[in-house]
Image (cartoon, rainbow, N blue to C red):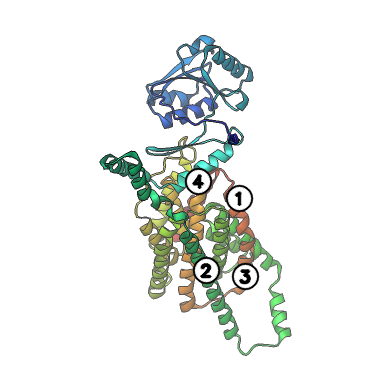
Amino acid sequence: MMSPQPANNLYPVFLQLNRLKVLVVGGGHVGEEKLNSLLLSCPDANITLVAITISDAIRDLAVKHPTLVLHQKPFVPGDLFEMDVVIAATNDAELNAMVKQSANDAGVLANIADTPELCDFYLGSIVNKGDLKIAISTNGKSPTIAKRLKELFNDAIPPEMDQVLDNMQQIRLRMNGNFADKVKKLNEITGVLVAESSPSKVSAERKWKKIASRLVLLFTAMIIGHVILSSVPLPPIGEIWATASSYVTREFLFFILAGFLAQLVDGLLGMGYGVTSATCLITAGVNPVAVSAAIHTSEIFSAGVSGYSHYRFGNVNRKLFKHLVIPGVIGAVLGAAMLVILGEHAGKWLMPIIALYAMFLGIKIFSRAFQIKQNNSRKIRRVGWLAWCGGFLDSFGGGGWGPIVTSTLISKGRSPRYTIGTVSLTEFFVTLASAATFFFTAGISHLAVVIGLLMGGSIAAPISAKLAGKLPAKTMMIGVGVIVMIWSIRLIVKTFL
């Protein structure tokens, strides 16, 4: 019985471009994009580019890559002489068709940009992790899906994988025995790589969910208990209803709007809740003391909803989360405790330094968004210390978890989507630890502002988490850079006024 034919009949291969001759037709944006993809995989690829007009960016590439030869002239069939592969990278349909016909006549494999039916092969999205290379194909149906999968693998595969491959090569070379024995031994060694898919991982995830749920319920019970006990003996029901209904005013609706806008920004960019909500509330004439207290309290619940939403929409890197959460919580508790001991103004001297550091990161992220190569992720050392500092400064200095942690990770090449989602989920635990410390020492007040921010933030959290998975990485990086710079400038101005 014959096996059914696969839906995708493409056969993947990996070409040694330094041994082949590649012709690229087109010197504009599309040609530049194809050249960057080729040269990123093989910097010494033998490429000849033919175009009537050649962009400055492509000329810069030719300076950096001597094996890239440029010819500023119209394409003619004779350009395919001795070529192995041709890529038509123009917006001219007639020229692309001419290149394809000429390639057929010359027996040269052709790729025609944005025209799958004319392609002999497709240029898939490529994941580069040192010696590990993964090519992704959707059979020409959706380059966007291929791009998203590329981002997923780039973030999921650790930078240490290259070192693992080197170690595995050494192990393989030292092994004795026949092929079957070697395969069996290597399978046993590499079994740890898929161990995370075991039932124990599902059990661990349920454990984290249970812990988070219980913490939320515990803190909620603490607040409700505080409100009830501070009101004993309870007034008549009519009086309670009259008091509660008096909160529903135009000002209260504005608090809801402020919470909605603040959480929308924070959920999309992983920061900006404090800046946005504080700006809205102060504009409305709310007392600055009430603003600070209300933001810290409401942020617990909005961070919880936001983190859960990011988790549900697949924006969380579990490994990064484990590295961040415990150091971040410890830093938050120590920062809050130290602030209570030393006084409210103790942390102000530290914030200008942090603001300057964040400003540097913001400018770096903003400029990085416009660079061509955005996927050169570097290994980030001491992530735990970064989380500890972020948690400590968030409590001790009155803010900084997002601008410090998110900005640092993105500036090192981490995927904006997964960084923002993971940091947002971790922020819930950090904020909860900080707020609980403040609650035991200073209590809670300004319930109208807190409830308004909470309601608005809870509405916006799932919306922003959903959009975070759809926004292009460049847009998210620009947004992060701008928010960080605004946060830094506001903090510096606030310090010296």
**Label 1's element?**
helix
- Residue 134 seen in this snapshot: yes
**Among the two numbered marks 4 and 2 on one chain, the one whose residue lies closer to the N terminus:** 4
Distance between mark 3 and mark 1 Cα atoms: 25 Å
Indicate whether 280 appears above or below 147. Answer: below
**Label 3's element?**
helix
Distance between mark 1 and mark 2 Cα atoms: 27 Å
Indicate whether 112 appears above or below 162. Answer: above
**Among the two numbered marks 3 and 1 on one chain, the one whose residue lies closer to the N terminus:** 3
**Among the two numbered marks 1 and 4 on one chain, the one whose residue lies closer to the N terminus:** 4
> Crowdedness of circle 4 by 10 Å Cα count: few (<14), some, many (20+)?
some
Indicate whether 341 appears above or below 389. Answer: below
**Among the two numbered marks 4 and 3 on one chain, the one whose residue lies closer to the N terminus:** 4
What residue is disc 3 on?
Answer: 451
Between 149 and 70, the residue placed more toward the observer is 149
**Among the two numbered marks 3 and 2 on one chain, the one whose residue lies closer to the N terminus:** 2
Between tags 3 and 2, which lies in front? Answer: 2
Q: Which mark is residue 195?
A: none
Residue 231 on image: x %, y %: 61, 85
Between tags 1 and 2, which lies in front? Answer: 2
What residue is disc 2 on?
Answer: 210
Residue 166 on image: x %, y %: 31, 41
Residue 376 on image: x %, y %: 42, 40
Distance between mark 3 and mark 2 Cα atoms: 25 Å
What residue is disc 4 on?
Answer: 152
What residue is disc 1 on?
Answer: 467
Left or right, residue 273 beside residue 42: right
> Crowdedness of circle 3 by 10 Å Cα count: few (<14), some, many (20+)?
some
Distance between mark 4 and mark 3 Cα atoms: 37 Å
Between 17 and 462, the residue placed more toward the observer is 17
